[in-house]
Image: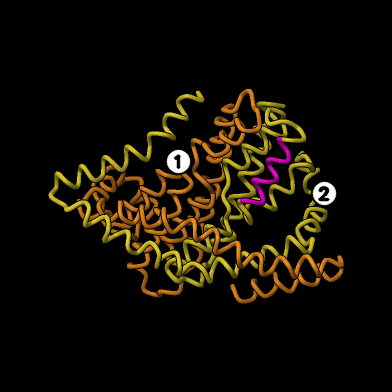
Amino acid sequence: MMNKIWLGLIVLGIVVGAINGKMEAVSASILQAAIDSVEILFKLIGPMAFWLGIMKIAEESGFTTLIARMIKPVMRRLFPEIPPEHPAMGAMIMNFSANILGLGNSSTPLGIQAMKELQTLNPQKKRATKAMLTFMVINTSSITLLPGTMIGLRVAAGSTEPTVIIGTTIFATVCSTVAALTVDRFCRLVIRD
Amino acid sequence: MLNIVQVISIWAIPVIITLIPCYAFVKGVPVYDTFVKGAVDGFKTVVRIIPYLVAMMVTINILRASGTLELVTKVMQPVLDLLAIPGDIFPLVILRPLSGNGSLAFVNSIFQHHGPDSLLGNMASTIMGSSETTFYVVAVYFGAVGISDSRYAIPIGLIADIIGFIAAVFICNLVFG
């Protein structure tokens, strides 16, 4: 499916670009995108190494199992197919915590670590499991309760009330996460592995 | 309120990286050696993501530079009017799941034109805070473990973005309107 979507989007973009007479910009944007993506990832190497190191300590000391045990009832309901004390549970909780606190630079490395743990339970290594999809859904729907980056930007833009958006952000976040989890539950029931 | 948020943001990471190694030390784990052992995989993990992210970013840039995204905005206009979504804010819905930097730049332009404390400014902030760069997250997370079949991850992510967006517009109209 990804093959068709990817090709379809590229062809669509090129055709629209041709009609709009924007071929020069399109052409320049292609290699620029390739350069930009590596630049983004380059900045991820340090945080990635840092959090993988911390997570290794958390794992070997049993800290991740400890937090996993603390919110076991919730996690077990969200991820029924993952053994409750599996390191994946702890890693996912760490990622959720970073998201909730709005620690953007830390949530990605922690999320990747959680994916690696989930991948150890995956029988088909190229295909996403239901647990991975649920984890992904929670991440893409965003569960930020403290939108720190946004508040910072508002302060920088001269806002007199930078924090008024906390309440509205939480409302919107809860709506989108509940909706996404509902659809995910439905997909789990309807779509077979 | 700003103080509480700042305190949490500043203290979260220092507290975590004191708490975990201290706990581990008490449990008899050689903390420094273990940190280094884990951190060594950082580079390898990021390198593995490169092909996935390049594939996605190239596509998104083509769609942006060619004017395809603008076209989508125009086509969607009747739906916006139906949901009382201001036309000025709509490009953010299209940009947000695709590009973190692009959507931040757009929010900044709203701040400049309308002010951060205006209805549009608050709406844009709420939308940014309550949604994710879905395509980036999917490419990076699945890319890191070499999964090419992401199944229904993107459709659900987009549904979440749309619901979050509608909820943000609704609540902002109610609270700040």
The orange chain is A
Separation of residues labelled 1 and 2 (CA atoms): 35 Å
Q: Is residue B12 above or below residue B158?
A: above
- Chain to which the residue tagged by mark 1 belongs: A
Residue B6 in percent (x, y) is at 47, 30
Quadrant containing the C terminus of chain B is top right
- Number of residues whose C-alpha sits closer than 10 Å to that of mark 1, classed few (under 14), some (14–19) or many (20 or more): some
**Residue located at (68% from left, 26% from top):** B176
- Number of residues whose C-alpha sits closer than 10 Å to that of mark 2, classed few (under 14), some (14–19) or many (20 or more): few
**Residue located at (70% from left, 47% from top):** B92
Q: In this view, does A159 lie above or below B20?
A: above
Q: Mark 2 points at which residue?
A: B78
Secondary structure beneath label 2: helix
**Residue located at (70% from left, 73% from top):** A8
Residue A18 in percent (x, y) is at 84, 71
Q: Left or right: A27 with respect to A84?
A: right
The part of the chain drawn in magenta is: B101-111
Q: Does the magenta stretch include residue B103?
A: yes
B176 and A23: which one is in front? A23
Secondary structure beneath label 1: helix
Q: Chain B is drawn in which colour?
A: yellow
Residue B87 in percent (x, y) is at 79, 43
Rendering quarter of residue A32:
bottom right
B14 and A141: which one is in front? B14
Dots 1 and 2: beta carbons under 8 Å? no
Q: Name the residue under label 1.
A: A100
**Residue located at (60% from left, 65% from top):** A35
- Chain to which the residue tagged by mark 2 belongs: B
Q: Main secondary structure of the magenta part?
A: helix
Kind of residue indicated by mark 2? Pro
